[in-house]
Image (cartoon, helix red, strand yellow):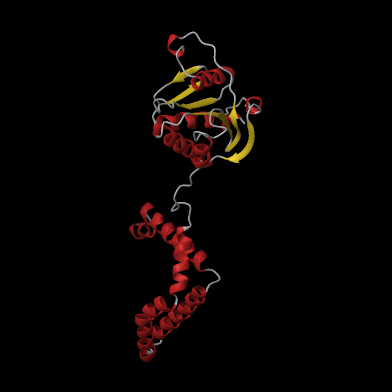
Amino acid sequence: MDQLQLLIPAWGDILEILFVALLFFRILLLIHRTRAMQILMGLLVLASIYLFSQLLNLQLLEYLLEAVFQYGVIAALVVFQPELRTALSRLGENRWFREPKVSSEDLLIEKIVSAVKALSSKKIGAIIAVEGQISLEAYGETGSRERIEVSSEILQTIFTPGSPLHDGAVVIAGNEIRSAGAILPLGSFRRVEYKNLGTRHRAAIGLSQETDAMVIVVSEETGNISVAREGRLATKIEPFQLRERLGGILQDTSSGT
């Protein structure tokens, strides 16, 4: 019975066998239909001949094959360098080794945040409405209708002082600028701290009262960033906070469609 137990593999042995088999299978897939596959078949033939020479005690043939195996590996590395490089690059294409892809939502957020940071540092006034699940089509009709992919440079250009669209709002839906120079409704509110707000902040609150949009405002007096949503205005927003808030509304929009 003790001898039979030696034939029963342990869990570690089974895992090791499976790992080696998977490794060889992966290698065979990589070299399939390449010159390396032909070389592998040739090596298997030489290995068979070497085993045959040992069984028949063919010492000269065995000596020659040992010399081939000893120096042939180095020669194979030199001759088949392109195939090996291709195989390694294909191995690197495995999704486990890839860098995580940046989603379209993350790219959009970075473009908006980058523009807002630049405008804030230059104290250039701006108001940007990011559409939620409620369409902003009607509000966009009050401005210049556009269908331009969002970029930090375009947003900064629109709000450049002296631009004909500088005083209006930019409406963003999806990853596109749908309108520039739009006129937004002014909010009606009772809170005392809102009474002395400028036109942009009042318009941001007004739109957030009528829709589920998130409205970003950059003050041209202080450069402070504010965000209006659901009729409430949050002031002195930092860029990392703006990222989080944009991520929230874009996630809500994608899950609702």
Q: For the view shown, which residue lies furthest in the front direction? A: 162
24, 181: nearer the viewer: 181
Tell me where residue 114 sits by quadrant. top left
Q: Position of residue 131 (x, y in %)?
A: 58, 29
Q: Is residue 90 left or right of residue 178?
A: left
Could you tell me which quadrant the C terminus lies in?
A: top right
Point 47% across, 66% down: residue: 87
Q: Position of residue 196 (x, y in %)?
A: 45, 13
Could you tell me which quadrant the N terminus lies in?
A: bottom left
Q: For the view shown, which residue lies furthest in the bottom direction? A: 60
Q: Is residue 164 left or right of residue 234?
A: right
137, 169: nearer the viewer: 169
Q: Position of residue 167 (x, y in %)?
A: 54, 28
Q: Position of residue 169 (x, y in %)?
A: 56, 28
Tell me where residue 13 sits by quadrant. bottom left
Point 44% across, 70% down: residue: 84
Total number of numbered discs in the rendering: 0
208, 43: nearer the viewer: 208
Tell me where residue 47 sits by quadrant. bottom left
Q: Is residue 31 above or below residue 187?
A: below
Q: Is residue 72 above or below residue 221?
A: below
Point 53% across, 41% down: residue: 104
